[in-house]
Amino acid sequence: MCIVCAVTGLEGLSVLPHLEILDLSFNKFTGSILSSIGALPSLRTLRLRGNGMDGVDNLRGLCSLKQLRVLDLWNNHFAGELPECLSNLTSLQKLRLTYNSFKIPFSLSPFSNLSKLKTLYADHNQVIYSDEGEKNSAKFLQTLYLSATEGYGGDNFPAFLHHQRELQVLHISNVRIANDGFPAWLLRNNSRLRELNLVNDSLSGGLEFQPHWNLTQLDISDNDLEGPIPSNVSNFLPNLSSLVMSNNDFDGAIPPFESGKLMYLDLSNNKLSGTLPGTLAKGCPLLRTLVLSGNKLDGRLLDFELQSLKTLRLDHNQFQGSIPIGLSRSPALNFLDVSNNDLSGTIPSWLSTMPSLDVLDLSGNDLVGELPRGLPSPWMTQVYLSKNRLVGQFRIDSISDEYRLLILDVSHNRLSAIEPMEITTKAFPYSYQGRNLLLMSGINLSGNNFTGEIPEEFGNLTSIKLLNLSHNALTGSIPSTFSKFEQIESLDLCYNNLTGSIPAQLVDLNSLAVFSVAYNNLSGRTPERVAQFATFNENCYDGNPFLCGWPLPKKCTPGSPPQPSLPTEDGDDVDDGEVIDTEVFVSSFTVSFGMVLAAIATVLYINPNWRRRWFYYVEMVMEGCYYFMVDHLPVPEKYKVLDPSSGRLSWQ
């Protein structure tokens, strides 16, 4: 027996007729080599992962490998229907077609002759509808992954699934199944099933569980399931470790979960209401992740004391009251999001001492008071406190290399001053895995009441990527130290009272994609039109009447840059660059006034009711003016006459 674990060329394969294992993964081979591989009659394992192969017709070169047990075509460019001759691979036990563009019938008819096939990975392909009844003899599948980049499966699950008895892992996702509800019969027929994933399959109707002792993972998110969550979840599925039912239309209260093995629970983005059941804290001691975001839950937050809890997301609900101290006794808590609720009170100081807390989001509540000292703590990477009623000074005590902070957002509060800071050179850690948010490092202080000058120490945050100080009352000039923001992508200073010129050194910020100094009192020339500053338009500089130069319409005069005009002795401002043309002004005023009079006359001519009201109104105004003059202006006695009807003096 000859085994080749990795081959970088095909030279010499013809002299290896007894070759059993061939791995050509992550090279640049094309589909044309498959005919050469088909000449290896003893081959049992073939891996062609990540080559970019295409041409379904080329797969026919493998149809003679009747000893083949493992075929891995993961991450290539194959497209179209599978060749029928693949049914000749009767010894095949494991087939991976993931990340291609194969057209795979929902009935799995191309695999009907593969009676030994136990594992089929056909996810991330196209799933097409096929009405082929019971045509399938692959009745001994243990693992099936079938997810579609696009696909329609028909009105019901395929018939072959009713006859599987060995299934342990079943993932069918992104396949539109028009009229079927949750397939409770899958649990009833497959006692060995451990994982069931039916994500985004257009399932509708209510939810019904069957008793099942082996199921450990259930994901039915992104469907149209509705009604209450069955109260017997914990009793019927006692060994569940992960339950995901997010993005459906479930309503009613959360049932009492009492599962000693439950570690992951996600019921987010439904219509659940009521309070949190106390059994979540007592009956699920191993719970690590609890996600209840986007519901209509209310009442007070539970006084959680879960030793294993790492992620708690209760955002976008209607919770009230203060942040419970019980959370401080969850030492493993890493991610806490209670944003967009109705929480009140102050931010507890113990949040800054939680040893594992990495992400903290308290934004969109009604929290008051000052920021606790020590928050954010050195080990936090993301802190969101925006849209509350926080007051006082903003301070960051000794941001240094030991800090891991990526995002700090305290925008839209009532903070009033930026306290002088000691900021040393800071190196942000970057993670290029997971969410794109982790690629951003920034501070958002917008929408507060900050006054005074921008501390020059901000410039020492050399790795910052976002700085937003907009919508405050900051004064003074833009610090030239901002030119040290070598990685900054967004700098927003608009809607302040900044003065002076824009530092010319900012043109060296080659990563800058968003820039705004609009609506300040800046003067002088705009930065030179080079690098990124060649892409910024007039809106970036609006509202600064003493700025000139491209892209503004106001040109700079030779010599000194334009400066704010000085008041004259009469107190009027004079701007030599903005002289009003008197003839143009008089002409435009006369034309405008004439147009207004013509419009009024036209309306009164067309509508007699308005005409009567207009003359009545004019008469009342004239009479009021007349009597005002009689009562208040000094008139000689000889011109005064007493009106016998009204008893008032009038003029003769």
Image (spheres, rainbow, N blue to C red):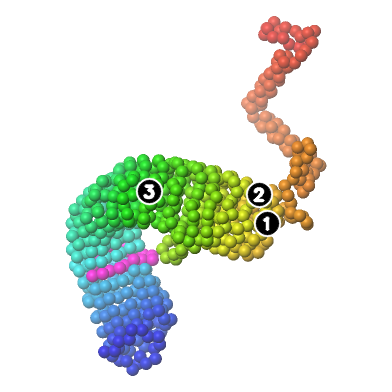
Using the numbered discs, state the Cα–Cα distance from disc 2 to disc 3 in whole angstroms. 41 Å
Residue at mark 3: 350
Position of 128 relative to 550 (above/below): below
For the residue marked with disc 1, what is the amino acid?
Thr
**Magenta stretch in the rendered image:** 142-161
Tell me if 293 is positioned left or right of 442 in this view. left
Quadrant for the N terminus in the image: bottom left
Residue lying furthest bottom: 15
For the residue marked with disc 3, what is the amino acid?
Trp
Q: Which mark is residue 526?
A: 1
- Tell me where residue 143 appears, x and y as whole percent: 26, 69
Report the residue at 35% width, 72% height from top.
98
User: Which label sits in the foreground, 2 or 3?
Assistant: 3
Position of 154 relative to 409 (above/below): below
Residue at mark 2: 499
* Magenta highlight: main SS: strand
Report the residue at 57% width, 61% height from top.
485
Q: Is residue 135 part of the magenta span, yes or no?
A: no
